[in-house]
Image: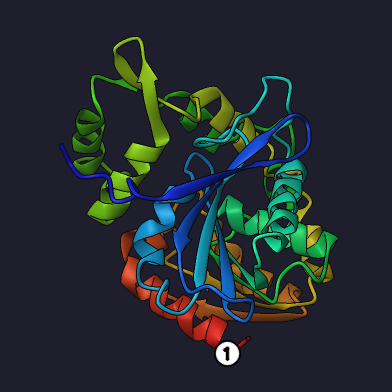
Amino acid sequence: MTEDPTATLSTHMVPSSDGVTLAVHDFGGPAGGDVPTLLFTHATGFHGRVWQPVARHLTDRFRCLAIDLRGHGASETPPSAPLAWGSVAGDVLAVVDEMKGWGASGVHGIGHSMGGAALVLASARRPDAFRSLWLFDPAIVPARDLPPGISNPMAEGALRRRETFPSLQAAIDRYGGKPPLSALHPDALAAYVHGGFGPRDGVVALRCSPSTEAEVFRGAPGSGAWEALAEVRRPAAVLVGRVEPFSPAAHAAQIAGELEQGVLIERPELGHFGPLEDPSSAAADIAGWVSAHL
């Protein structure tokens, strides 16, 4: 069995709106009110624990925490809870508020894909929530690119996902040999599977079901994140890998330009899963950015 790199994490449960209770994973880091805190948010269909291979390069100087957003990972989401991206942004702010009681200060938002869009929405809603933002391939597109009601290829792909495997190792073996998840670093892939599946009737099943993932993808065109860019007042790095089918990479330069203090950083050697493909280089980028914006 491939080892779970996140097995020793401590997890806090934080109440949010709509009866949702969020899982917040603590990767560790130095104590003290003057230590910068990094809050990681994940892509659709993933969860916070996938950031552990990145965070392990950063906990010598930063406190690192990651959220399982509603409908994902170990978070508890009632069937009636909305999955709109504005509600996901509210989850982020609920965690930021809770972190104040843990002594966190100088919080920097670190987001990937949908998680990056959630940070933008949260920062626009509350400008003082973050010291800075670091966004890898944020899933922010003009609504005109995919109007509501039009076929959404990402949602359709999610509905075709295999939901169960005989074991965690079977899932790791399958994903590791087939694109797109074969691009992930082995530790990130192991973290994804161990945190993304739970037991069900003698097999393991996705915690974020295909129908939930599809609903989240369908919410992208109406997320409001594109309109929120102009309301973000903090320094924000927009990192982009190579342009791939259905990825938001093609909009990265415009996203950076819409931000008041946006900076575009190109990483053409990486794909949409960049931080999960090369955790050490992502950590170096994050460390450099955060250290420049303390």
Answer left or right for 96 relative to 253: right
Q: Measuring from the top left, give residue 138's x and y in whole percent.
A: 59, 60
Q: Residue at x 55, y 32 (%)?
A: 213
Viewer-proximal residue among 147 and 46: 46
Q: Residue at x 26, y 47 (%)?
A: 182
Q: Measuring from the top left, give residue 197's x and y in whole percent.
A: 38, 30
Instruction: Kindly give the residue lying farthest to the bottom in the view shown.
Output: 292
Answer left or right for 70 relative to 45: right
Mark 1 Cα-neighbour bin, 10 Å: few <14, some 14–19, many ≥20: few
Answer left or right for 147 relative to 27: right
- Three-letter residue code for mark 1: Ala
Q: Residue at x 56, y 68 (%)?
A: 38
Q: Measuring from the top left, give residue 43's x and y in whole percent.
A: 52, 49
The quarter of the rendered structure image containing the N terminus is top left
Instruction: Kindly give the residue lying farthest to the left in the view shown.
Output: 1
The picture quadrant where one finds residue 107 is bottom right
* Relative vertical location of residue 291 with respect to residue 72 in this rendering, above or below: below
Counting the numbered discs, the total is 1
Which residue has dot 1 on it? 292
Q: Residue at x 50, y 65 (%)?
A: 64
Viewer-proximal residue among 246 and 164: 164
Residue 293 visible at all: yes
Q: Secondary structure at mark 1?
A: loop
* Relative vertical location of residue 130 with respect to residue 47 in this rendering, above or below: below
* Relative vertical location of residue 209 with respect to residue 119 in this rendering, above or below: above
The quarter of the rendered structure image containing the C terminus is bottom right
Residue 268 visible at all: no
Answer left or right for 191 relative to 65: left
Q: Measuring from the top left, give residue 57's x and y in whole percent.
A: 35, 72
Which coloring applies here? Answer: rainbow
The picture quadrant where one finds residue 109 is bottom right
